[in-house]
Amino acid sequence: MKPIALLMLLWAVFCGCRTNQSPERQVDDLQITAQVKSKLATDIGVSSITNISVNSTNGVVTLSGQVNSPEVKAKAEASAQSVANVVRVVDALQVTPKTTP
């Protein structure tokens, strides 16, 4: 029974560690993510970027989270698209206007 359990554990580790990206592509995506975050902080402000998550895979940038207005959402998408090596931007941002007390 132990050899089967060990074999299954090794298979799970192997499958979990497998990636479809080369190490170079992974580094590129990390750089793209950092550049998009920096561009967003410059273009829409640091206070807005805290609610935005940025992920990059194979040059496809996904923006998710919440913004205060449709204008900020459009500006975030345009800013991300303007970064070098961005292939496409998937905009999953939600507009949730601030409520005043």
Image: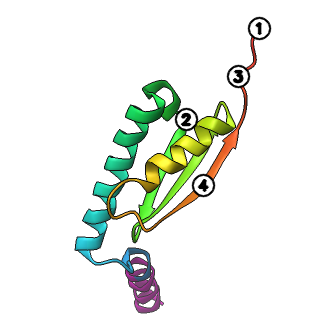
Q: Is residue 84 above or below residue 94?
A: below
Task: Out of 2 and 11, give the one closest to the viewer.
Answer: 11
Looking at the image, the residue that sits furthest to the left is 24
Q: Position of residue 1 (x, y in %)?
A: 48, 90
Q: Residues within 10 Å of mark 4 (few under 14, many from 20)?
A: some
Q: Earlier in the sequence, mark 3 or mark 4?
A: 4
Q: Which residue is mark 4?
A: 91
Query: Of the numbered discs in the image, which one, if any, rests on residue 101?
Result: 1
**In this view, 27 is above or below 22:** above
Residue in the picture at 45% in, 56% down: 81
Tell me if label 3 and label 2 are in contact, CB under 8 Å. Answer: no
Res 98 label: 3
Q: Earlier in the sequence, mark 3 or mark 2?
A: 2
Decide: is 46 above or below 11. Answer: above
Give the answer, above or below, for where 62 lies relative to 51.
below
Q: How many marks?
A: 4
Give the residue drawn at x 40%, y 91%.
Answer: 3
Residue appearing at x 48%, y 34% in the figure? 49
Q: Residues within 10 Å of mark 1 (few under 14, many from 20)?
A: few
Label 2 belongs to which residue? 51
